[in-house]
Image (cartoon, rainbow, N blue to C red):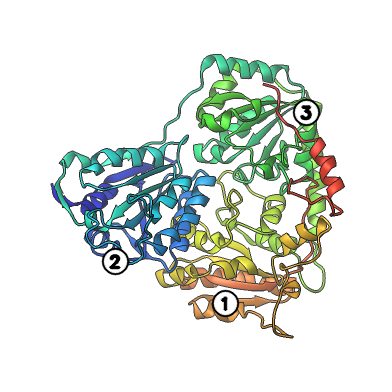
Amino acid sequence: MQLTTAQALVTWLAAQRSETLDGREVPLFPAVFAIFGHGNVLGLGTALQESDIPVWRGHTEEGMALAAVGLAKATHRRQVGVATSSIGPGALNMVTAAGVAHANRLPLLLLPGDTFTSRAPDPVLQQVEHFDDGTRTANDAFRAVSRYFDRITRPEQLIATLPQVARVLTDPADTGPVTVALPQDVQAETYDFPAALFEPVVHRISRPRADLRVLAEAAEALRTAQRPLLVLGGGVRYSGAGSRIVEFAERHGIPLTETTAGRTLVPHDHPLHSGPLGITGSASANAMAAAADLVLAIGTRLQDFTTASWTVFANDARLVTINAARFDAVKHGALAVVGDADAVVRDLAEYLGDWRVDSEWTARSAGLRSTWDAHIDKLRAPTPGTPSYAQVVGVVNESSEPNDYVMTASGGLPGELIGGWRATGGVPTMDVEYGFSCMGYELAGAWGAAMAHSEGLVTTMLGDGSYLMLNSELFSASFAGHPFVAVVCDNDGYAVIARLQEGQGGEPFNNFYANCRSNHERPPRVDFAGHARSLGCAVFTAGDLDEFRTAYARARAAAVAESRPAVLVVRTQPSSWTEAGAWWEVGVPAHLSGRSAYEESKSAQVRYLRS
């Protein structure tokens, strides 16, 4: 088949299929997000125009690539968003999104344009020239945040590259962002490609089983434990193993807790649910972790927010991990069981037979969580005046339907959603991007999630800082006709960083607007409602909790009825937080008052758990 390089690539994309968790066959690449320029408009742009793949226009390259990340998360890594840009600044704008996908183990395909391989017209517009290396371009910046990187300098290279692209994007152990740089002259070159390259392929996520010797060792470790704790991470979600692991816990009486990426896998009121783990988690789960003598961590990379910078577990606890990626499984001296979460837990149950944990330990979970629930109830209770984050989250939680989807990414809202949200369980319904903590993901990611989330409504929650960081994709979603609700909590600055700054004894500086330099005696304020309205959104405002409850109901109705984002702006308290009582390590200078507490917590930090 004589095709241009770009046509061959697009034809291959259209032929790739995927199997969802419930067995449906869907396109592996359901959407391309594009901003065209001289580096991709005639080659790849023409090929996309000739294809049937839906192409959506973005308004910032970072935003549209983050939308692709949100799409991948909402489809549980069964579908992959594609983002393309021209060379130079357009390409580099997508590097942040690649970092988000890389940190969160999410598939993303980036197709940046690149400079001419012929070098005949060099230096071209937007080209960066390296005095020591004629082969290097701006796209080499993607190498640090790509799971797989290639630059196509001859059309026939696609024949070898495309199978590797599919491998990385669909491999549960290695998945992450793939960058294929496309020089603009090569995009337009023709080649006689083998027709077999474009035959339809259905990619089914592999379910590798564990080594039987290691599985037997893990079972023995559990049998000898008195106080085991199950930690469910994002890998449980992507494996579709949530219900199996809950059944496993019920059969053996093991309490359950969740990481950030594993949130909403367990029904909130399940008697074995200890609550979420870590700094942004719950005091109940953290107390269970401190008392556990064995931690069975499934599908998690054990990030510092989950482990409270490795102070949440007891020093003498044993760590057993189940993970598709050996890289994550071997961390901290764990007994590493490498394999798919669903397959491994199914096999592990057979090894354990009718073994059960002592009922006293099993019952402790529900008692501690009920105390945490009472604490959250108190934080959510209506009060006059400006509402807190906890109160706003409480209204959204109580107003949401079982299949709705809630999102956030940075600042103080992750702590409120992770620590306070009450899930019905069954279907994962939360995306908290706290692997890269990317400000601006909240709006762009919601656009992608809204495309993928056909049942229920997406609500994204963000602060004023994140809104100002990246809001262009509100117009993209409004123009395209993808509905979601965006709750913008305005507390006058970067409040959660101000809390960290002042909580360690630092002086208020450059976080709240009141502590920022300005040449104005009365600096201007942002009209978030007016701005969102100008981007084509339905807009609502609220000043207190009762107004917010009414406005949120109206925003939900408007988003669905009008097929566009509905933005709800609410003033919130700047210094009221949900605290889980855990420590997070940040560098504290010796002259600040927080240094002594830092040193005390540092001394309790687990350096290496026993294997």
What kind of residue is marked 2? His
Q: Quadrant of residue 550?
A: bottom right
Depicted 468 relative to depicted 506: above or below: below
Can you identify the residue that label 2 sits on? Answer: 38
What kind of residue is marked 1? Val
Can you identify the residue that label 3 sits on? Answer: 315
Name the residue nearer the viewer: 151 or 350.
151
Marks 2, 3: nearer the viewer? 2
- Tag 2, which secondary structure? loop
Q: Are marks 2 and 3 in contact (CB under 8 Å)?
A: no
Q: Quadrant of residue 205?
A: top left
Q: Quadrant of the C terminus?
A: top right
Number of dots carrying numbers: 3
- Left or right: 215 with respect to 281? left
Residue 455 appears at what percent x and percent y? Answer: 49, 55
Label 3 – label 1 distance at C-alpha:
51 Å
Depicted 565 relative to depicted 610: above or below: below
Residue that protrudes farthest toward the bottom in the picture: 521
Name the residue nearer the viewer: 599 or 169.
599
Label 1 crowd (10 A; few <14 / some 14-19 / many >=20)? many
Q: Which label was assigned to residue 539?
A: 1
- Left or right: 474 with respect to 521? left
Can residue 454 be spotted in the picture?
no
Residue 132 appears at what percent x and percent y? Answer: 38, 50
* Of callouts 3 and 1, the N-terminal one: 3
Label 2 crowd (10 A; few <14 / some 14-19 / many >=20)? some
Label 1 – label 2 distance at C-alpha:
36 Å
Name the residue nearer the viewer: 531 or 510.
510
- What residue is drawn where x is 33% and y is 49%? 135
